[in-house]
Image (cartoon, coloured by chain):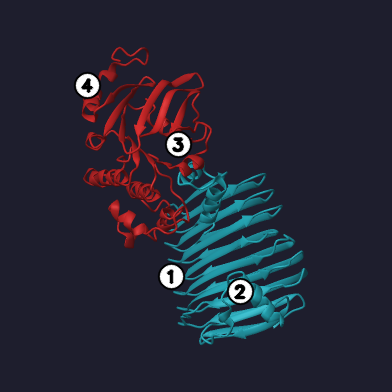
Amino acid sequence: MLLLEIKDITYRVKEKEIFSGLSLAIESDEVHAILGKNGTGKSTLAYLVMGCESYIPTSGVILFEGKIINDLKIHERAQLGITLAWQEPVRLEGISVRDYLTLKKKEIDPSLYLEMVGLSPELYLTRMMDKSLSGGERKRIELASIVALEPKLAILDEPDSGIDMLSIQDIINVINVLKKNGAAVLLITHREEIGKIADRASQICNGKIICSGDPEMVAQYYKSRKCEVCIAGVCAYV
Amino acid sequence: MSELEELMKVFGEAGGDNSILVREDIAHFAASGNKILSTRVTQGLEIKAEETATGIDARVRVQEGTIIKNPVHLCFGILHKKGLQEIRMDIKFETGASAHFIAHCIFPKAQKVKHIMDAVVEIGENAQMTYSEVHYHGPYGGIEVIPKAVVKVGKNGRYLADFSLITGRVGKLGIDYTVKAGENAVIELIARVFGHGDDKIRIKEKVMLDGENSKGLIKTRVALEERAQAEVTGITEGNAAGARGHVDCMEIVKDSAVAKAIPIVNVTHPLAKVTHEAAIGSVDKRQLETLMAHGLTPEEAVDVIVKGILK
């Protein structure tokens, strides 16, 4: 069943066109990886789907479970089951890890989710979500919070950035748990080993999806570095 | 109902623990206006207080080597709509003494009330005082609070103060603290205030790191809404080798509120180091969006952020 459908969206910032007729569809239990060079708009796509402030498509529609969500605010989209883990999670003063993991669901056991991301509940539940946490710790807690929300669609913007190579398996575990819980995942990543666990992948270039399908095939296409010669005009390789 | 019972009733309603008055292992001093209502001391603690025309004069001593396990509770308040309360405190912690004083300042009906606290504090060598001042104000904003303290901390001494006014209207607040730190002394001044309506908040805290290797932190957290105004001045002087100080001020503004922060750093010794940071603005957009992506409404998200910084 189709969960998310992005139909022919254009997104312009001042004179610059970030997306020009981008379309993408994600099934309800699909892990879909997004590849693309820096600056191609991968994070912008995440913000458009989440509905962040000033991220409204210039034209085109975003449908979630068949309903147009272009005009919905972030929390309204979250209440439908969409959530986002930012590439650089914020720090929050005076809020404990326990409080953060149970913000919306007071009844859950937050320990389970911390263990899932390789953090000891004894050491972390009472820690504050402030600058005393390292970037990697904060990132893991964000991933734990996303699983705890039990979303229908989790957008993970470079979940591997700031987390060491040895811990990549923790991220893969999180994605697998999300999938097992019935969620779809829109996965923005540079790591091939994480991209490989996706069901499908798409490459963004010049404001469009230029290649979509089997993750290995898309990764090969991306790695052929044809984009290195892109002049952001008409892409010769589409 | 006696005045003491009434005072403690309001204290209980504000979340305080009324058992502090009956427990014999907990020292306390309670005064309403210029009337002393109740006093209990424990071993090594001396409180000599007298009523004046407009308030209370009190002399407090924690004797040498005395470590008071349970916090000492000071309850001050005015239960009427109008009134003046001037508290003059002379506090001395002798060598090696240690205690936590909690001052509960209760003004539930204040419409034209003035509360002045003027304290002189001396912390001896190796002594430690933790001082928490918690205010419970009513909804009217007709109150003026002027806490002033001059604190001197001896060698290896510690002075940790935490001022909190986040319940009810602030009215007019004018904090003025000066702390002088001796060798290896540690100073921490924390203030948390939530202003509403046309509240006016002025906080001036000064730490003088005069002793070698002394350390000081001034941390201020202010949230303002409606037409409230705040001016926060954090002054730290680094006057000795190895002195380390930091001034950290954060103010969140909503509606038509106005906030101002003035961090002043004055270093007179080449081996001293003092840093400062100040952040003033509306609620951070990314924090807000993160909480909203967790399903909180914008109002709930702002509430979580503001309560967090005032915690």
Label 1 is found on which chain of the structure?
B
Q: Amino acid type of disc 4?
A: Ser
What shade has chain A been given? red
Do the residues at discs 3 and 4 belong to one chain? yes
Give the quarter of the figure containing the C terminus of chain A: top left
The kind of secondary structure element at disc 4 is loop
Residue depicted at 50% across the width and 68% down the height: B159
Label 3 is found on which chain of the structure?
A
Q: Which residue is under mark 1?
A: B156
Do the residues at discs 2 and 1 belong to one chain? yes
Label 2 is found on which chain of the structure?
B
Question: In whole angstroms, how far apart are the C-alphas of marks 1 and 4?
Answer: 65 Å
Q: Which residue is under mark 3?
A: A50
Residue A108 rendering spot, x and y as whole percentages? 39, 58
Q: Which residue is under mark 2?
A: B12
Q: Amino acid type of disc 2?
A: Gly
What shade has chain B been given? cyan
Question: In whole angstroms, how far apart are the C-alphas of marks 4 and 2?
Answer: 71 Å
Q: Nearer the viewer, residue B297 or A85?
A: B297
As drawn, is B243 to the left or to the right of B29?
A: left
Tell me where residue A171 sits by quadrant: top left
The kind of secondary structure element at disc 1 is loop
Q: Amino acid type of disc 3?
A: Met
Tag nearer the camera, 3 or 2: 3
Residues marked 1 and 4 touching at CB (< 8 Å): no
Question: In whole angstroms, how far apart are the C-alphas of marks 3 and 2?
Answer: 45 Å
Label 2 packing within 10 angstroms: few (<14), some (14-19), many (20+): few
Q: Amino acid type of disc 1?
A: Asn
The numbered mark at residue A224 is 4
